[in-house]
Image: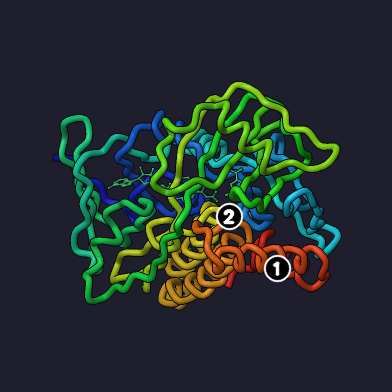
Amino acid sequence: MPTLSTRVAIIGAGPAGLLLGWSLRQAGIDFVIVENKSREYILGRVRAGVLEQGAVETLQRLGVSEGVDARGLVHHGIYLQSPGLRHHVDFNELIGRTVTVYGQQAVVRDLEAAHDAAGSAVFYEAGDVAVRGIETRSPSLTFTHDGSDYTVEADFIVGADGFHGISRPAIPNNRLTVFDKTYPFAWLGILADVAPSTDELIYALHPDGFAMHSMRSNSVSRLYIQVDPGDDISNWPDSRIWDALHTRLASDGWALNEGPVTEKSITPMRSFVASTLNHGSLFLVGDSGHIVPPTGAKGLNSAISDVTQLSAAIVTHYADDSALLSSYSDTALVRQWKVQQFSQWMTDLLHVRPGTGDEAAFDYRSQLGRLDYVTHSLYAQRSLAEQYTGLPLG
Ligand code: FAD
Ligand code: DHB
């Protein structure tokens, strides 16, 4: 029964867990990462695609930006569209900031490669992962791996195990309140082997529902449409998806290129925030502590901002100053609630509420009014630019 001793035991080898481990390594702090899925599974998950400027700067500062520097697509803004009317919001012109389109899978692949080269302790396909003693100063993590039972003794446990992980539920119910909201729609997303039909992302409101055109490279497009949350992917043959995209993204003089669909899935949308990201020796980062609807592209970016703050707090703790660690949860949640309201605002702006009555008709026209305001007011555009490219860390 192997027992390992380390400073920080991290649960989850998604972007948050791998980045935290890498950041601690750069500061010379020992860690172990334990993940219950295989590498192939993790790399097969198609998820986020947009990095805030601060997230790219974090990767650069930590020396893991070779991929994003070489293959990331720097975008100066986005297009916002109401039926037939497409407006460019130029973040760079408005506030001198940009975003970079680079898939979450690529971020994870780059971090895995860095950990491999450095010989980091990362256990994949671990079974029965459990935390113990989080209310003490000597917590531990137990799991099975390759037929052996492991114990990792640590100073801190970090839950980077996503929304469905075990770390948040380890906090007693009377110490944690959950704030959440579900939406009456979902996103159907596809990856297609075709050059993007746009230079920058298009977010479109249409009476049939939201549509978005994103990309992964100069030869791979990523596209989304709003669907019913109870819908099944089998109801959506490729031809029906392309038809919906053509209709919802239509703009005079513009054409959408079609290509072979290589992946498609439906993702429900919800907002969720835990009232604390810290209990005793346990700290939460990323989706284990909060999730957003994807419209503002904030999920991955929030995970990166949590990690940036927590790793700075752990580093200063070992330099004999625990103030940042004590305030980590409060500081991260202040930023997170601003991100939540932005994601909710973008979602409300661009999605059609189900229903056909007077209220639905009112809501849709009000949304058109809001879009017209946002695309014509310098102040509103600056506010959008500031939030989309990323608020400063608290
Ligand atoms: P995760 O990426 O979820 O990583 C958590 C890791 O912990 C996983 O590898 C998991 O296998 C592991 N784990 C879970 N339980 C255990 C356990 N018991 N023991 C050990 N390991 C465990 N955001 C956007 O901005 N745009 C998008 O288009 C977008 N699309 C998304 C689509 C889907 C289907 C999902 C689920 C999320 C999407 N997101 C999107 C959100 C974004 O991908 C997440 O915010 C981001 O992955 C958060 O990173 P994380 O490391 O905190 O969590
Ligand atoms: C992508 C996802 C988002 O949620 C978003 O707002 C923009 C782009 C993407 O997958 O490329």
**Circle 1 crowding by C-alpha within 10 Å: few under 14, some 14–19, many from 20:** some
- The residue that appears at 71% across and 45% down in the rendered structure is 201
Give the residue drawn at x 57%, y 60%.
347
Q: What element carries label 2?
A: helix
Placement of the N terminus among the 4 image quadrants: top left
Label 2 to label 1: alpha-carbon separation: 16 Å
Horizontal and vertical percent position of residue 192: 61, 28
Q: Pick the residue in front: 185 or 151.
A: 185
Residue type marked 2: Thr
- The x, y position of residue 325, in whole percent, is 43, 72
What residue is pinned by disc 1?
A: 370
- Residue 206's place in the image compared with 353, above or below, is above
Q: In this view, does 72 lie to the left or right of 171?
A: right
**Vertically, is 310 above or below 108?**
below
Name the residue at 31% across, 73% down. Answer: 177
Residue 288 showing in the rendered view: yes
> Looking at the figure, which quarter contains the C terminus?
bottom right
For the residue with label 2, is its CB less than 8 Å from the closest atom of ligand 2? yes
Residue drawn at (39%, 67%) of the image: 180
Q: Residue 360 carries which label?
A: none
In the image, taking residue 220 as reference, residue 373 lies left or right, namely: right
Q: Which numbered dot is residue 295?
A: 2
Query: x, y (%) of residue 195?
Result: 72, 28
| Element type where label 1 sits in the image | helix
Q: Which of marks 2 and 1 is nearer the N terminus?
A: 2
Q: Nearer the viewer, residue 130 or 3?
A: 130
